[in-house]
Amino acid sequence: MNDVLKSPEISIVVPTYNEEGNIYKLYEQIVENLIASSIKDYEIIYVDDGSSDASLKHIKELNATNPKVKFITFSKNFGHQNALRAGLDYAKGNAVICMDADLQHPPELIPTLIKYWEAGNKVVYTKRKNTNDLSFFKKLSSKMFYKLVSYLSETKLEEGTADFRLLDRSVVEVLKKFNENNLFYRGIIPGIGFKQLGVEYTPNERFSGTTKYTFSKMVRFALTGITSSSAKPLYFSIYLGAFLAVCSFFYGLYAIYVSLYTTEAVAGWTSTIASILFIGGIQLMMIGIVGIYLGKLFSESKKRPNYIIEESNISNI
Ligand code: UDP
Ligand code: MG
């Protein structure tokens, strides 16, 4: 209980993976904006997700001048969502703001987030406006991602909502109880209820460095998003199977007709091989879908930690 009394008003959680060029700039802007909101009691937690550059060194330098800067260092790269999870696990603030390290999530929005939180909202999430600064590929892939996840899952994902949001302490406590591996916050938070409000923002360009979401990380993230919020893909095999059964039935009728009433019956090799390949392909795809869910069950059943902390200056770690 003592902890609650001492807790800072606002915690800022920043997943950081090789962001050496952004640490200082982000820190300055966060502090500036917290002061603008008259927040003196805060903590900034950089979750260093196994960076191999000087990120941690810079964070420690900041800590030496301002003890409100905290750090959690992972033993290796565990991914963005796990870095967020660690931040939420150890943040002590009455409200926790999560934001990226690269200044694409504008710190100038912090006072707005705090204002709406003080007005009684438990989740203040943000929606990215599409700007011309974003690459065509990023725009297209993100549009497809939101559409697909929304279509397939029970909760609707609003386009452009990312992991830049303010969460009230009560919501953080709820989220800490979600024990599944590969947490997908974007899919979970809209579905947990509470008073939620969205604000729009225009993203900045990355201040320094390049994106840490490689193509393969993005594909994996999209698959996690879909399979962790919905079992609908599993039903595809039933629908597709039924559809193919109906098609094969009519094709069968046609084959009987050809062999009974025409003289072209032997020329069936092309269609045979084509249908074998087609069905084979579909089957492999469906086994793949089932495999993803099975893999999820496998990894959940092991109950391994989602991240391993190597070092931190947070008191209760
Ligand atoms: N990030 C992380 N671990 C990773 C990949 C990314 O902690 O494995 C952090 C990264 O440092 C940044 C945020 O997650 O603060 C978002 O990543 P990025 O800006 O590279 O993604 P993009 O904005 O290009 O989608
Ligand atoms: Mg970014």
Image: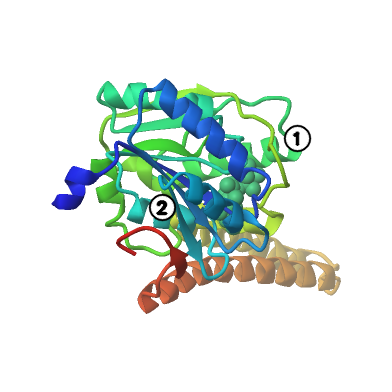
Which of 68/252 is in front? Answer: 68
Count of marks overlaid on the render: 2
Q: Amino acid at mark 1?
A: Phe
* Between marks 1 and 2 in the image, the one whose residue lies nearer the viewer: 2
The quadrant holding residue 274 is: bottom right
Query: Circle 1 is placed at which residue position?
Result: 136
Helix, strand or loop at label 1? It is: helix
**Residue beneath the point at 64% across and 65% down:** 282
Q: Is residue 93 above or below residue 260?
A: above
**Which x, y percent locates residue 288?**
58, 69
**Which x, y percent locates residue 159?**
53, 33
Which of 73/308 is in front? Answer: 73
Query: Circle 2 is placed at which residue position?
Result: 87
Which of 166/227 is in front? Answer: 166
Q: Earlier along the polypeptide chain: callout 1 or callout 2?
A: 2
The quadrant holding residue 116 is: top left
**Residue beneath the point at 86% across and 71% down:** 267
Q: Amino acid at mark 2?
A: Gly
Q: Is residue 50 above or below residue 165?
A: below
**Residue beneath the point at 36% across and 74% down:** 303
Helix, strand or loop at label 2? It is: helix
For label 1, count other residues whose C-alpha is less than 10 Å away and answer few (under 14), some (14-19) or many (20+).
Answer: few
For residue 154, side relative to residue 286 (left or right)? left
What colour scheme does the image use?
A: rainbow
For the residues marked 1 and 2, what is the alpha-carbon distance in whole angstroms?
32 Å
Which of 282/247 is in front? Answer: 282
Which quadrant does ligand 2 occupy? top right
For residue 188, side relative to residue 214 (left or right)? left
